Each structure stands twice: as C-alpha cells, then as structure tokens.
Image (cartoon, rainbow, N blue to C red):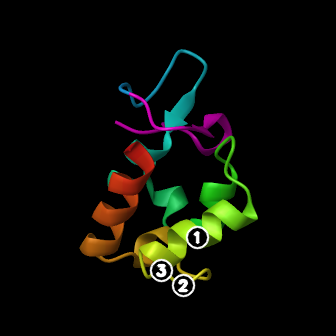
Amino acid sequence: MPCSTPTSCAVNAPSSSSTSSQGRCAIDAVLTDPPAFVQTAKVADLLLAVPKYGPVKVNKLLGRCQIAPTKTIGGLSRRQREQLVALLTN
C-alpha cells in the first residue's frame, strides 16, 4: 500500500519497496495506486518532488507520455499512467 497519511508522504525515486520506515513512498507506487489525497495533485508537481527531477526533465518526461503539465494524478488514463511508471522505473 502506498502512503498512509498526507503529512508523512515524501516522494522517493522508484525502488523495489513502496514504503520505508521513514514514511516515504516510491513514486511508482504512488502513481500506480494513488491515495485519495494525491488524486487532485498535478503530475508535474508530484514529479518535481522526486530527487534529481527538475523542471526540464519533468517536462521532457510529460511530453514523452503525452501528458499535459496541468493534468492531475486522478485524471491520468491507464496508458499514461503505465507509460509514466515504465519510464520512471527504467
């Protein structure tokens, strides 16, 4: 299960485990099964919270997945979600 509370959810780069003892979540776990409080967050803002992902890298990634910068996590199609997770985990 992804994060349990909104205040304890910091986003990490993709990893084999979805959560750690520090209350952090892997970005792929958050995108695959987003908690209710993440549904209204913008995809770009969530990706910018990942270490080593700046505005340029995030915009390139969104462009490759054909995702508008203003798209919310809850508004992603299955294809967009799967493509984004695949690019982040490679």
- The numbered mark at residue 60 is 1
**Residue 33 in picture, x, y percent from top left:** 33, 52
Of the image marks 2 and 1, the number of the one nearer the N terminus:
1
Q: Are marks 3 and 1 in contact (CB under 8 Å)?
A: no
The residue identified by callout 3 is: 67
Q: In the depicted view, which residue is nearer to us: 16 or 65?
A: 65
Q: Which range of residues does the magenta coloring cover?
A: 1-15
- Determine whether 23 is above or below 89 in the image: above
Answer with the quarter of the image where residue 87 lies: bottom left
Q: Residue 83, can we see it?
A: yes
- The numbered mark at residue 40 is none
Q: How many angstroms separate mark 3 from mark 1 (CA)?
A: 10 Å
Q: Residue 42, can we see it?
A: no
Q: How many angstroms separate mark 2 from mark 1 (CA)?
A: 11 Å
> Is residue 3 one of those drawn in magenta?
yes
Magenta stretch: helix, strand or loop mostly: loop
Determine the residue positioned at 48% across, 66% down: 39
Tell me if 80 is positioned left or right of 44 in this view: left
Q: Amino acid at mark 2?
A: Ala
- The numbered mark at residue 68 is 2
Density class for disc 2 (Cα within 10 Å; few <14, some 14-19, many ≥20) is: some
Q: Amino acid at mark 3?
A: Ile
For label 3, the SS is: loop
Answer with the quarter of the image where residue 76 lies: bottom left
Q: In the depicted view, which residue is nearer to us: 25 or 88?
A: 88
